[in-house]
């Protein structure tokens, strides 16, 4: 598997921006020009004040400076608008690129990783998290640039006028910076904790709403509500405590930072008094000094958003850095649909689940995997379908290791019918057609007929156009399973893996599913993960899986004769059936 390198936030953002980088650059350039325009009114005001002091009464002169100031305002707002619209354009391209990359990544990582991650997590990152960074990404570059450049430009001009006064006008900067440092102390840790607390609140809210049926049925409302309300309370108090801790620094910073006249006025008076500063320069310096700190404060507000971006880009990066399954692109020559597992070992995490599985599944045969719960049946099936890569040994199809078969070819070769296959929120017709997108409506309906679902579909108000609902929620479990069997039939893959459902065991449904499966697998290599032994007694071979190993292989009668564990399972099954 391929492990991509860890990438920093800026590099990652640059990567996402791709060809739109020039829009960002242009937006920064326009923002800088906007900054220059925003200084024009300051300059015009100082000129007018000086003229007033000199006693100038030339109305058109004042009017023309007013026009210059107005042009400065206008120029600034036009350039600002252009700049932010360009950066918004670039940002929307960035966020759609991020979503596209995550979606593509999910097709390249082991399927098991996707199945093992709560689907809400991907959705949350792809939709909400990515959306939440949009405003910051769009504004941070042009606005932070201009908010930092305005004061820098003013300070540079002050140094040109009088370096001593320039230094005096910066007197509140170190005090404000100290307050800022106090405020930002432990910021990363606290922010990460705050995100954790919010996540916990989200999780309890989801749990509370999703589990409301169980909560009501078992009278757990008080306890569950308590858990939820505790999480809400913790979220609120965490934010409040944090704010209280930094409030003093914050108020001092906000109060002291912009108070530049504290130094400029008295020191300016002294220099003016001893004749080392002209009245004109003094007035210009006073006016310009007032424009230094406000933009710096605005820039400071972005630090919070930048930390948020760093965390979210980190989360996106963690998904994009997931090791990928490496598969060739050239089709492999499969000699048959024989499946062979040789010394297969595998574990989902640290602990091993399969400990050297050897199994031959001849082409065209029906092989049932049976065994106690948790013995490793589904894991074997998932390794054959290449949802995960084996840790040791090999799985091969037609003599070729599955790792050497291109992903598309493997998908075409195997139809995996899980216990609860997902139905998309679209018509039943389209849900079945997913098995073979090129299938005509007639072919889809023929598959539905063969899978025994045509009748119930026709009984629905909109027939095949009925929307199956999120995860097929509008249909019963048995109906959903039959639709997924129809989907697999349409796919017509030579190998079928069927994870037999433990639910929906009412005899009528079982009979329909059995006959649907019989049609599905004619002439195919079928692997059934069997939970009800009565459905697989006619299998060509039954592999008894116990504690991650193949304990025995044989026909039903051979295993009854030779395997005490199989006999035990069979007897338990018979008694359960009798009891039912
Ligand atoms: N996605 C997963 N992540 C981590 N552990 C898993 C995962 N799936 C299964 N396991 C563990 O691997 C072991 C084998 O599970 P597996 O589902 O293959 O057994 P099974 O025989 O199919 O069980 P059942 O009959 O109950 O479906 C179990 O201990 C199980 O807890």
Image: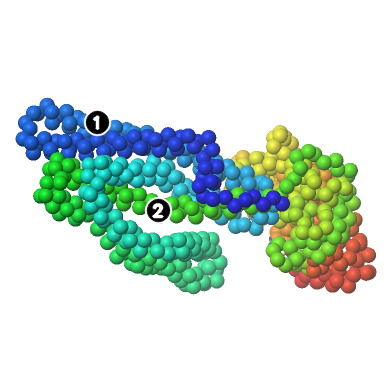
The image position of residue 194, as x and y in percent, is 45, 63
Which residue is pictured at 88% across the width and 48% down the height? 399
Q: Is residue 458 visible?
A: no
Q: Is 230 rendered above or below residue 516?
A: below
Q: Quadrant of the C terminus?
A: bottom right
In this view, 261 is above or below 551: above
Work out whether 547 lies above or below 93. below
Residue 550, numbered circle: none
Residue nearer the viewer, 177 or 350: 177
- In this rendering, the answer to whether 230 lies above or below 465 is below
Q: Are marks 2 and 1 in contact (CB under 8 Å)?
A: no
Q: Secondary structure at mark 1?
A: helix
Residue 88 at what x, y percent from top left?
A: 43, 39
Residue drawn where x is 38% and y is 61% of the image: 184
Q: Residue at x 42, y 68 (%)?
A: 234
* Residue 482, horizontal then vertical, whole percent: 72, 50
Q: Mark 2 or mark 1: which comes first in sequence? A: 1
Q: Which quadrant of the figure has residue 245?
A: bottom left
Instruction: Find the distance from the CA under tag 2 to the CA under tag 1.
Output: 32 Å
Instruction: Write down which quadrant ligand 1 falls in.
Output: bottom right
Which quadrant of the structure image shows residue 335? Answer: top right
* Label 1 environment density (alpha carbons within 10 Å; few <14, some 14–19, many ≥20): some
Mark 1 lies on residue: 71
Q: Nearer the viewer, residue 197 or 570?
A: 197
**For residue 38, side relative to residue 389 (left or right):** left
Helix, strand or loop at label 2? It is helix
Q: Which mark is residue 303?
A: 2
- Specify whether 294 is left or right of 307: left
């Amino acid at each position: 598997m391929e492990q991509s390198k860890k990438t920093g936030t800026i590099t990652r953002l640059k990567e996402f921006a791709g060809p739109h980088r020039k829009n960002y650059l242009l937006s920064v350039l326009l923002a800088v020009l906007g900054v220059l325009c925003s200084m024009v009114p300051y300059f015009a005001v100082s000129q007018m004040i000086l003229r007033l002091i000199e006693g100038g009464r030339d109305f058109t002169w004042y009017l023309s400076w007013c026009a210059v100031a107005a042009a400065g305002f206008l120029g600034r707002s036009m350039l600002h608008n252009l700049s932010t619209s360009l950066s918004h354009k670039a940002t929307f391209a960035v966020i759609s690129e991020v979503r596209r990359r995550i979606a593509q990544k999910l097709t390249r990582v082991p399927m098991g990783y996707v199945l093992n991650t709560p689907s809400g997590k991907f959705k949350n990152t792809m939709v909400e998290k990515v959306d939440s960074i949009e405003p910051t990404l769009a504004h941070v570059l042009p606005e932070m640039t201009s908010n930092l450049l305005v004061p820098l430009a003013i300070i540079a001009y002050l140094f040109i006028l009088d370096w001593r006064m320039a230094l005096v006008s910066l007197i509140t900067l170190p005090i404000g910076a100290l307050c800022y440092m106090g405020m930002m102390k432990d910021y990363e840790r606290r922010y990460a904790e705050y995100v954790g607390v919010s996540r916990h609140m989200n999780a309890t809210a989801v749990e509370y709403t999703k589990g409301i049926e169980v909560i009501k049925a078992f009278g757990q409302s008080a306890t569950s509500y308590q858990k939820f309300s505790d999480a809400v309370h913790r979220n609120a108090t965490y934010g409040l405590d944090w704010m209280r801790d930094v409030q003093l620094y914050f108020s001092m910073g906000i109060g002291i930072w912009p108070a530049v006249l504290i130094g400029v006025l008295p020191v300016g008076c002294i220099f003016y008094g001893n004749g080392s500063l002209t009245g004109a320069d003094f007035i210009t310096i006073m006016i310009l000094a007032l424009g230094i700190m406000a933009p710096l404060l605005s820039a400071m507000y972005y630090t919070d958003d930048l930390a948020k971006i760093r965390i979210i880009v980190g989360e996106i990066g963690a998904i994009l850095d997931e090791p990928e399954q490496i598969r060739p692109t050239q089709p492999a020559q499969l000699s048959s649909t024989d499946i062979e597992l040789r010394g297969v070992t595998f574990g989902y995490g640290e602990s091993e689940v399969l400990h050297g599985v050897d199994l031959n599944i001849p082409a065209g045969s029906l092989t049932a995997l049976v065994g106690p719960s948790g013995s490793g049946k589904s894991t074997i099936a998932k390794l054959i379908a290449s949802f995960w890569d084996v840790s040791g040994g090999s799985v091969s199809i037609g003599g070729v290791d599955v790792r050497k078969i291109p992903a598309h070819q493997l998908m075409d070769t195997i139809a995996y019918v899980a216990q609860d296959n997902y139905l998309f929120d679209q018509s039943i017709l389209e849900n079945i057609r997913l098995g073979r997108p090129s299938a005509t409506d007639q072919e889809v309906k023929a598959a539905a007929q063969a899978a025994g679902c045509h009748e119930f579909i026709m009984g629905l108000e909109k027939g095949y156009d009925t929307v199956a609902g999120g995860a097929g929620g509008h249909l019963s479990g048995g109906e959903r399973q039959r639709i997924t069997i129809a989907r697999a039939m349409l796919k017509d893959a030579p190998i079928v893996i069927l994870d037999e459902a433990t639910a929906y065991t009412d005899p009528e449904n079982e009979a329909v599913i059995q006959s649907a499966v019989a049609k599905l697998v004619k002439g195919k290599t079928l692997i059934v993960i069997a939970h009800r032994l009565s459905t697989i007694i006619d299998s060509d071979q039954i592999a008894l899986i116990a504690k991650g190993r193949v304990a025995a292989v044989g026909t039903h009668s051979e295993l009854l004769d030779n395997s005490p564990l199989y006999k035990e399972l069979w007897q338990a099954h018979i008694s359960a059936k009798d009891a039912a």
